[in-house]
Structure formats: structure tokens, C-alpha cells
Image (cartoon, helix red, strand yellow):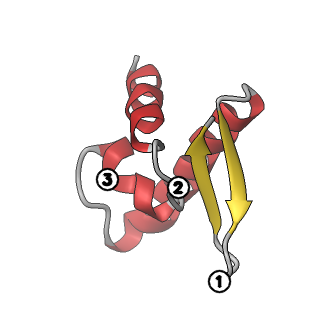
Amino acid sequence: DNHVGALDRLRGHLAEPRSAVECLATLFKREVRGDEFGLAAAEAVAHLNHLRARREVARQMDAGGVWRWRRR
């Protein structure tokens, strides 16, 4: 249930292009800092890749080399 809710929040957040880091607060409903950051970022990318595999989001690399994810 936790992942289903996180995916629903993420879908809404991706109306505009976002980096994985910009999705953290939406996924976890709080600010992520310190030792949690790496694991949280990896989980965010996993959620984004799940939505991408389902063809619900697309990604594009920006001029700075950062993947930006957006709802299709």
C-alpha cells in the first residue's frame, strides 16, 4: 500500500519535469537529509523507472546532464 500511494503522489508531481532529487519530498512526505539521502534517491529512481517501464512517464536529459522525468 505504501508503494501504491507513493506512485500516485509521484504521478501527480510529474506534471512538470522533475529530477529524482526533486521527487524525494513528494515520495517520502518529508525532507530527506543526511545518511538517508543515498537510499532515498535510489528508491526514487526505482519508482521512476517503474513508471517508465509502464510507459506512464518519460525522461529527458537536460543541458546539465540531469535526467528530468515527466508524466506522459
- In the image, taking residue 16 as reference, residue 27 lies left or right, namely left
- Furthest residue in direction left, as rendered: 30
Q: Earlier in the sequence, mark 1 or mark 3?
A: 3
Amino acid on which disc 1 is placed = Gly
Residue at image coords 47%, 33%: 11
Residue at 43% across, 53% down = 23
Disc 3, SS: helix
Q: What residue sits 52% from the left and 55% below the top?
A: 17
Can you say whether 61 is above or below 8 in the image? below
SS type, badge 1: loop
Please, what is the three-letter code of the amino acid marked with disc 3? Answer: Ala
According to the image, label 1 marks what residue?
64
Mark closest to the chain's N terminus, 1 or 2: 2
Select label 3 or label 2 by which is in front: 2
Which sits in the foreground, 23 or 17?
Answer: 17
User: Residue 20's x, y, as percent?
Assistant: 53, 58
Q: Secondary structure at mark 2?
A: loop
Image location of residue 24, percent across then percent down: 39, 54
Q: Which residue is mark 3?
A: 25
Disc 2 marks which amino acid? Answer: Pro
Instruction: Name the mark nearer the viewer: 1 or 3.
Output: 1
Q: Which mark is residue 17?
A: 2
Who comes first in sequence, dot 3 or dot 2?
A: 2
Answer left or right for 58 relative to 26. Answer: right
Q: CA distance from mark 1 to mark 2?
A: 14 Å
Cβ atoms under marks 1 and 2 closer than 8 Å: no
Q: Are there few (<14), some (14-19), or many (20+) residues within 10 Å of tag 1?
A: few
CA separation, marks 1 and 3?
Answer: 22 Å
